[in-house]
Amino acid sequence: MKNGEGLIIPEQLAGLMYSAGLISREKADSLLSAVDIQPIQSDGSCRRFLRIGLDGKALCLAVAPATAEGKDLLEASAAGAIGLHLSRRQVPVPAIYGWHRQSGLILYEDLGDIRLYDLLEQMSAAGLRSLYRQTIDQLIFMQRSGLRGFDTGWCWESPRYDQELMVARESRYFLQAFWKDMMGREVPEGIDEEFREIAALADQGSDDVFLHRDFQSRNIMIKDEAVRFIDYQGGRLGAPGYDLASLLLDPYASLSADLQADLLQYYLERVNVGHSVDAGGFLRQYAFLALQRNLQIIGAFSFLSRVRQKTFFSRYIDPALCMLHDRLQDPVFVSFPVLRGMVDAAVSAEKAEASARQ
């Protein structure tokens, strides 16, 4: 097994590939010498990603959890079950060729290497707007089609994106990983109350849809000029504005305010086709969902860069912080002075550090 020995169990890989019709029995028996495996670098995940080739041809991707137990295996199980469901609902996700439930090993269709992220600086403004509009069309389809027949028992963390998750996994993630650990600041009095109120407002609005939960440019593949969605294993029920906010506020993309406004309006137009959506109510809820996503991004990037030493993420903390600062200038957030003060202080500290480095 070239360039990948020890990462997965050969018998499991061979059995899955044979059952999927990817290799013959003869090839399965001689898998160790026949198959070429190339590790693929992951982003924030601890999972292992392997491109599997045979006779110079890419056959599939193998994704294995870090361990075959506990939360790692639960996450892999969610990926398998939700992936099969989305495929059956015609959502543009990679096909699943095989799934070894005991180990969590999954074989996926190989979508290549081109992500939406990789095209951001290559396309014209018109081309990029068109591609994002295609993405939004497919997002709306996933939200609605993925909801039908969705079993919350497949979810590995929680069945729904709710207030408890917002506070524990997003607001306090920001508080711990960024404010306390990275900034070295004390927790200000009153912030927990503000976090709970923000979460309540973010959870007050539209009906649930299928929620991807990490819908951003590095999780959107482009194959044959069509968008395909990956890393949906955190899927659950939730408000439709969250995935849209994840796409538009994506710090990897840094979309202009004008393009964000254009795409937000496009979403509202398209989501109303065949349905009746209260645009005013959607936009009120969207403001708070976008704030929640912004907090989650900063917390996650701070943790990944500081604790897991994945320095790639550190470059995106300041842009996300500036985006959060600008968002909090909206009058709708005037009643959250503690959070606004924290973000003002963080932006000022970063400007002082940048000035000192010059």
Image (cartoon, rainbow, N blue to C red):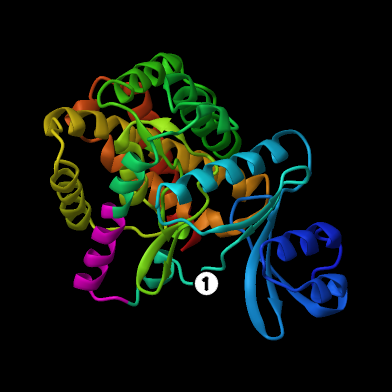
Residue ID at (63%, 55%):
310
Query: How many marks do you count on the picture?
Result: 1
Q: Which three-letter amino acid code belongs to the residue tagged 1?
A: Asp
Q: Is residue 356 left or right of residue 108?
A: left
Residue ID at (66%, 62%):
20
Is residue 230 visible to us here?
yes
Image location (x, y in percent) of residue 110: 56, 68
Q: Is residue 300 left or right of residue 47?
A: left
Question: Eyeballing the image, is 188 above or below 262?
Answer: above
The N terminus sits in image quarter: bottom right
- For label 1, the SS is loop
Is residue 2 visible to us here?
no
Q: Is residue 300 left or right of residue 10?
A: left
Question: Eyeballing the image, is 51 above or below 234?
Answer: below
Q: Is residue 235 left or right of residue 321?
A: right
Q: Which residues are magenta?
A: 123-137
Query: Counting other residues with Cα less than 10 Å from the Cα at mark 1, is it few (<14), some (14-19), or many (20 or more)?
Result: few
Looking at this view, name the residue that lies furthest to the bottom.
56
Where residue 209 sits, quadrant-wise, is top left
Q: Nearer the viewer, residue 174 or 154?
A: 154
Instruction: From the image, give the main secondary structure of the stretch colored magenta.
Output: helix
74 falls in the magenta region? no
Residue ID at (31%, 22%):
337
Residue ID at (86%, 78%):
33
Q: Which residue is mark 1?
A: 113
Image location (x, y in percent) of residue 180: 57, 31
Image location (x, y in percent) of residue 172: 51, 26
Q: Nearer the viewer, residue 77 or 16?
A: 16
